[in-house]
Image (cartoon, grey):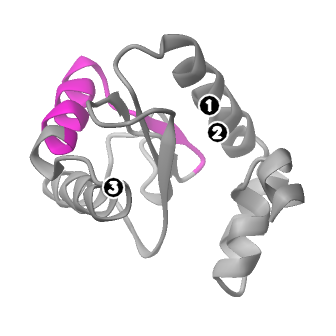
């Protein structure tokens, strides 16, 4: 559980740096969500998620860990792929849609293999970015 807490802290700090939200508010919201039930999804994946002030749309932070960590996943397997989802408090529908997209990707063994095998950040971006965003880039 200790490593999971460190991972939650890191995700909150990365989200704060990237999206200008409060690291402490993001950390507190992620911890609160984990108290409701672990977000370790199985297959070596976790999808911590929360709602936090300061955002206009859902955003994410993806980590591929060199060394898997214990995360209280549903299958008791350690986690090496983590996608943290942060959404505005008032945007429940977009939050659920984004959560469903990430969970669909993490459920697919081929997608997990591609994420684990991606050689660089550009390859990861191509796998993770929504189709509309990739086409616009």
Q: Is residue 46 visible?
A: no
In this view, the residue in front, 24 or 119, is 24
> Residue 10 is drawn in which quadrant?
bottom left
Q: Residue at x 24, y 51 (%)?
A: 8
> Most prominent secondary structure in the magenta stretch?
helix
Q: Residue at x 51, y 33 (%)?
A: 57
- Across the whole image, how many numbered discs are drawn on residues? 3
Which residue is most to the bottom? 119
Image: 2 above or below 17: above
Q: Is residue 85 left or right of residue 51?
A: right
Q: Which residue is mark 2?
A: 102
| Residue 98 badge | 1
Which residues are the magenta region?
26-43
Q: Within the magenta stretch, is there residue 39?
A: yes
Classify mark 1: helix, strand or loop: helix
Q: CA gap, disc 1 to disc 2?
A: 6 Å
Q: Residues within 10 Å of mark 2 (few under 14, many from 20)?
A: some
| Residue 59 percent location from the top left of the image | 49, 44
Q: Are marks 1 and 2 in contact (CB under 8 Å)?
A: yes
Q: Is residue 78 visible?
A: yes
Q: Which residue is mark 3?
A: 15
Q: Residue at x 31, y 63 (%)?
A: 14
| Residue 56 percent location from the top left of the image | 45, 33
């Amino acid at each position: 559980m200790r490593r999971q807490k460190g991972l939650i802290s890191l995700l909150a700090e990365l989200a704060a740096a990237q999206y200008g939200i409060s690291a402490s508010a993001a950390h507190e919201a992620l911890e609160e969500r984990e108290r409701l039930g672990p977000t370790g999804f199985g297959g070596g994946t976790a999808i911590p998620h929360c709602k936090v002030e300061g955002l206009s749309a859902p955003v994410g932070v993806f980590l591929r860990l060199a060394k898997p960590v214990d995360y209280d996943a549903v299958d008791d397997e350690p986690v090496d792929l983590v996608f943290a989802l942060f959404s505005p408090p008032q945007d429940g529908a977009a939050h659920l849609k984004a959560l469903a997209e990430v969970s669909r990707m993490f459920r697919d063994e081929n997608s997990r293999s591609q994420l684990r095998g991606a050689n660089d950040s550009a390859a990861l971006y191509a796998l993770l970015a929504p189709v509309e965003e990739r086409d616009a880039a």
